[in-house]
Image (spheres, rainbow, N blue to C red):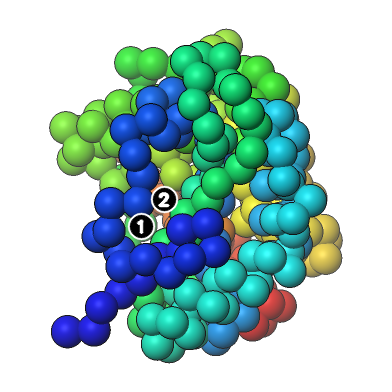
Amino acid sequence: MLQEYLLFNDEFQVVDAPVLTASNRSFKFGDGLFESMRMINNKLQFADLHADRLAAGMKALKIDGHALMDDYFLRQKTADLAKRNKWNGNVRFRLSIYRGGAGVYTPEINKAGYILEGVPLKASTYELNSKGLIIDVFDEMTKPVNKLSNFKTANALLYVMAGLFKTQHRLDEAMILNQYGFLCESISANVFVVYQKQIYTPSLAEGCVSGVMRTVIMQLCKMNDMPLIEAQINPEILKEAEEVFITNATQGIQWVMGYGRKRYFNEVSKFLSEKLNTNNL
């Protein structure tokens, strides 16, 4: 069996090597953030959008070094890791950034460290799920709205709890509400709702992650004259909507089939999924 590698601060390490110590701030305090990215046919998709969000997130967390982690850095490091592992050019990556150094809650330094991991994929396109997802609304906790809400931080307990809820209720995905009770996102994706032939998605002011694929889908809608509104969305709309779909950078678009007794169509998600593949690959 071939040995697989990850990148730890520019050095290749075998995937099961103990690279982090007990003093790591991401482990201790969730002091960091991450990017999930997709490579298709040896091309890292939307590297510039990932780099922009990463820089904004590092600035928000006051972690130094965001200028070095630009789109060139992302393309270079993902290509290096794919080559080292002899992957076929279709890969899902996770780049985890943490604040280095010691200290208790108050950091002593703000230098960034990173780990880049990957998982090879078979598919060389974004594949729309053939069987629609079954969802429900996660109602045990809500997501706070603050200046860190739009980033993928290392503090992911809300999503872990939503994941346990999903498993317990035998769902494919769960919808998360913000602190005001409005639709925010799903466990690992942004949410789009088609209601009265209009496409809606929660605005960034609602506290959702500023998803790279969310941005791409909004651009695709604009290019295809499909009106899309960023809004505050009452979860009650899920009972009336014609379609619901979710998006993220690794899977593209996934359509939702059912919520309780409600059943949805997938025309818009099918159309956008085709456009996503023809536009970007």
Q: Quadrant of the N terminus?
A: bottom left
Kindly indicate whether the residue at mark 2 contacts the one at mark 1 (C-beta within 8 angstroms): yes
Secondary structure at numbered mark 1? loop
For label 2, the residue is: 256
Q: Position of residue 53 (x, y in %)?
A: 70, 46
Q: Nearer the viewer, residue 12 or 217?
A: 12
Q: Is residue 32 left or right of residue 173?
A: right
What residue do we see at 48% from left, 85% from top?
83
| Residue 156 visible in the current orientation | no
Q: Amino acid at mark 2?
A: Val
Q: Nearer the viewer, residue 227 or 27?
A: 27
What mark, if any, has residue 132 been given in the picture? Answer: 1
Placement of 74 over or under 214, stated as above or below: below
**Which quadrant of the figure has residue 267?**
bottom right
Q: Nearer the viewer, residue 173 or 103?
A: 103
Q: Position of residue 57 (x, y in %)?
A: 68, 37
Q: Position of residue 104 (x, y in %)?
A: 47, 15
Q: Is residue 101 left or right of residue 225?
A: left
What residue do we see at 20% from left, 38% from top?
167
Secondary structure at numbered mark 2? strand
Q: Amino acid at mark 1?
A: Gly
What residue do we see at 62% from left, 47% from top?
211
Q: Quadrant of the C terminus?
A: bottom right
Placement of 225 over or under 27, stated as above or below: below
Q: Position of residue 35 (x, y in %)?
A: 55, 51
Placement of 259 over or under 214, stated as above or below: above
**Which quadrant of the figure has residue 277?**
bottom right
Would you call the spot at circle 1 few (<14 residues within 10 Å), some (14-19), or many (20 or more)?
some
What residue do we see at 23% from left, 84% from top?
2
Q: How many marks?
A: 2
**Which quadrant of the figure has residue 158?**
top left
Residue at the far top in the pictured view: 180
